[in-house]
Image: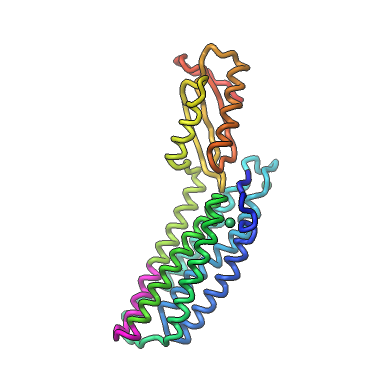
Amino acid sequence: MQFSKCTVCYKTIGWTGLVSNIFLSGLKLFVGIVAGSQALIADAMYSFKDLISSVLIIIGLKISLKPVDLEHPYGHGKVEFILTLVVSVVFIGLTGLILLLTMDHFFQGYHKPPHLIALAVAVFSVVANLFLFKYTRCVSTQINSPMVKTLSKHHGADALSSVAVSAGIIGAHYMGLIWMDSLVAVFETIHLLYLGVEIFWESFKGLMDYSAPADVLRKIQQTVLDFDEVKTVETLKTRQVGQGIWIDIVIGVNPDLRVDEAYDVGCQVEAVLFETIEHVAAVNVRFGAHDSRKLLTQGL
Ligand SMILES: [Zn+2]
Ligand SMILES: [Zn+2]
């Protein structure tokens, strides 16, 4: 049930994200207000979003990694999706509010270029987020946690957003385009809104027993058919529960096999699937004689 080859980053990732994003969002909000940069204030929202994600990761990973127990025989993986769903709704609401404020400010038409300290902070934010992006991506590829994956992707987006903020400040300050900072702020909040909806959709999919990707399905099929005794894959169902993939498969075996032989094949299939498919949490194999029209299945 656990796939943590990279346990050190795994255990610290929530806390690293929390501390660095408290710092980043606080710094950007403060300097954004003092220096009069709307875009930098909107940019603080990006870090604020990652701050919340980090808190969820700390709580969520703790719960979702709990081993199966009597009340939860299918594990605790879905808690990640539930937490993320709740947060995305709050985030969408908050961002919608900020969008109204920035639009209002933009169309009021009163603009003055932000102080240059805002530029320094934006550039610093680019560098910090690039570092966080690389660090979280390492962890997310190792453990397949949807929450860590999202966090990693967002650190990448945050770096880009801070690039846009820098461009806006440069435009407002050096090129006489004084409205540019506010325009960047409007675009930033629209993008944040989009990210919020995306997060909502991802967690919704997770709660709906979303299937594993097509290439994984193909790989499972291929792996199973590589057995000489296996003639067909009758049905193959997968679903993603938190970090893990659950596989339900019915194989059609050679009808000349005795039941105990077929049972052995089933066990081998199960073992090989655990070995070859990444992030498998559970495998349920059933078998039947492949040439009979009505497939008689035997539970394993
Ligand atoms: Zn439990
Ligand atoms: Zn690592």
- Give the vertical position of 97 relative to 136 (above or below): below
Q: Horizontal and vertical percent for residue 137?
A: 51, 57
Q: Is residue 142 magenta?
A: no
Which residue occupies the foreground of this view, 4 or 40? Answer: 4
Is residue 197 visible in the rendered image? The answer is: yes
Is residue 104 visible in the rendered image? The answer is: no
From the image, which quarter does the C terminus lie in?
A: top right
- Give the vertical position of 257 relative to 244 (above or below): above
Image quarter for ligand 2 equals bottom right
Residue depicted at 57% across the width and 53% down the height: 80
Which residue occupies the foreground of this view, 69 or 71? Answer: 69
The residue lying furthest to the right in this view is: 70
- Give the vertical position of 293 relative to 148 (above or below): above
Side of 265 where 165 appears, left or right: left
Q: Horizontal and vertical percent for residue 134?
A: 51, 61
Residue depicted at 41% across the width and 70% down the height: 161
Q: Horizontal and vertical percent for residue 207?
A: 51, 47
Residue depicted at 46% across the width and 31% down the height: 222
From the image, which quarter does the N terminus lie in?
A: top right
Name which quarter of the figure residue 52 lies in: bottom right
Side of 56 where 183 appears, left or right: left
Numbered-mark total: 0
Which residue occupies the foreground of this view, 73 or 58? Answer: 58
Which residue occupies the foreground of this view, 276 or 19? Answer: 276
Residue depicted at 40% across the width and 75% down the height: 165
**Residue span colored magenta:** 172-190
Dominant SS of magenta comes to helix
Q: Is residue 175 magenta?
A: yes
The residue lying furthest to the top in this view is: 256
Name which quarter of the figure residue 92 lies in: bottom left
